[in-house]
Amino acid sequence: MLDADLKTQLQAYLEKVVHPIELVASLDNGEKSQELKGLLEDIASLSSQVSARFDGNDARKPSFAINRVGTDVSVRFAGIPMGHEFTSLVLALLQVGGHPSKATQEVIEQVRHLEGEFRFETFMSLSCHSCPDTVQALNLMSVLNPNIKHVAIDGALFQNEVDERQVMSVPTVFLNGELFDTGRMSIEQIAGRLDANAGERAAEKLKNKAPFDVLVVGGGPAGAAAAIYAARKGIRTGVAAERFGGQVLDTMAIENFISVTYTEGPKLAAALEQHVHEYDVDVMNLQRAEKLIPASTEGGLHEIVLANGASLKSKTVILSTGARWRNMNVPGEQEYRNKGVTYCPHCDGPLFKGKRVAVIGGGNSGVEAAIDLAGIVGHVTLLEFGGKLRADEVLQRKLRSLPNVDVIVSAQTTEVQGDGQKVTGLVYTDRSSGESRQVALEGIFVQIGLLPNTEWLKGTVQLSPRGEIEVDARGETSVPGVFAAGDVTTVPYKQIVIAMGEGSKASLSAFDYLIRLPVDETTKESVAA
């Protein structure tokens, strides 16, 4: 099952196992069960600390548990955790085997002290780059707290269960049989949801922080670059981010990041966070900004009010809150979000195997999505608002070569239809004739661009008609001492490499602003020239 290179790497990891672990598989006579048996035999052969049994009686087959011998510490997978989930498998082996995780001690103690019985089930797909974070978080929680149990389920192998429970996006997490949440989640987010007093404690901790010299709001490529450049100047730097990594976490293949021929979003996001932590930066993750209160005088303190009620103050602010997927804003879209309406073809495509789907948008993202989906689903209908596709010609040629794809241009989607539980079709207007037409389908993948995250800034900084923050060549906004960078601004071409450059520039501009302020007793100690 495993090739020689993977075996060598895994064997090196398994040397870190402290406690004996046992793999207990539940199998049937199917091909996938035989694949799983081969995988577990390979793993067991690589370490004397690992053994395998094939007499499990779990109802889901193929599935297996990783048990710490003589204890109730256990992690379970229903399926064969390869692809993006292979890392989840390796971490589960190590953590059940007693190797410590990289979670902070604060989070570890929070999880250990959770009271109650928590039975989690996560539906994931092996092609989903958002799923491993959620799977790994819940696996670790089940290792830390015996009251927490978790099974990660490959939706592609358990299609009947996916249909029965109406799972139409991944990751989808159930807690004690009820829907808990959908989408990527970290261990901090999950523990915070289960710990009723977590938000109050976090707010109290933030309220006691001293003012910053530079406060970066947002943790994507622009925010990370800004934080690093500020910290290197020796000034007090903070980052408040709703989720560190931003849109990069939702990006699959990255092939145009100069000097790196190929990487994937979650990997790059982890590298960004690690790089920031190399410096003296106060990183405040899972913090959503709700209001900017500009300083009343030049050199005064700007205030960022957070969703939990706390506020942070700083002499300068760099806004890098990025953008999010644009919605169609038609009837039925929100009602059927994650019930057939989705925004990630890589994550959710396997759940629509053999079904009819639509892709909305004829740019590069939309055409790439249609090409990827065509290899999984039964049929793809691509709808483009304009009179022709906007994607690169090489992508259009590939799209036209696929037999199970129809392209409709001059099509304005006007409604998402459903039966109350799931999507059944969509309605669009032919912009050439004005006629209204209907397409029967089970899934709709929306790929129509980005919307800047600036609603919370209206009335404080100057915004463009598109809602982007207007900046000058130095990254300055209309408010002195407030700068902005990345996809949230009017700077054209929303690319990772451009966001990093703009974040660095905004940080240098903020430092230049600081050193030119009049020096008095309240400022001279905090700003290093």
Image (cartoon, rainbow, N blue to C red):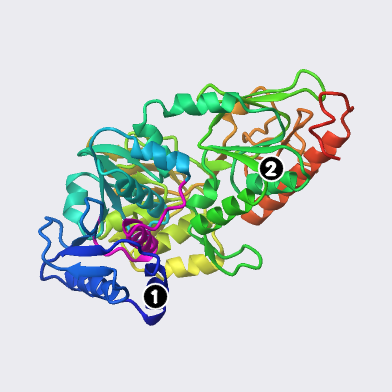
* Residue 369 point in image, percent of width and height: 43, 58
Residue 411 part of the magenta-drawn span: no
Task: Classify mark 1: helix, strand or loop.
Answer: helix
- Residue 329 image-quadrant placement: top left
Magenta residues, as a range? Answer: 76-103
Instruction: Give the numbered dot on residue 485.
Output: 2
Quarter holding the N terminus is bottom left
Q: Tag 1: Cα neighbours inside 10 Å, few (<14), some, or many (≥20)?
A: few
Q: Nearer the viewer, mark 2 or mark 1?
A: 1
Front residue of 134/373: it is 134
Residue where numbered disc 1 is placed: 6
Looking at the image, residue 273 sits to the left or right of residue 47; the answer is right
Using the numbered discs, state the Cα–Cα distance from disc 2 to disc 1 in whole angstroms.
Answer: 40 Å
Residue 81 part of the magenta-drawn span: yes
* Residue 505 point in image, percent of width and height: 76, 47
Residue at the extreme top of the image, as rendered = 296
Q: Tag 2: Cα neighbours inside 10 Å, few (<14), some, or many (≥20)?
A: many
Front residue of 509/11: it is 11
Three-letter residue code for mark 1: Leu
Q: Is residue 201 visible?
A: yes
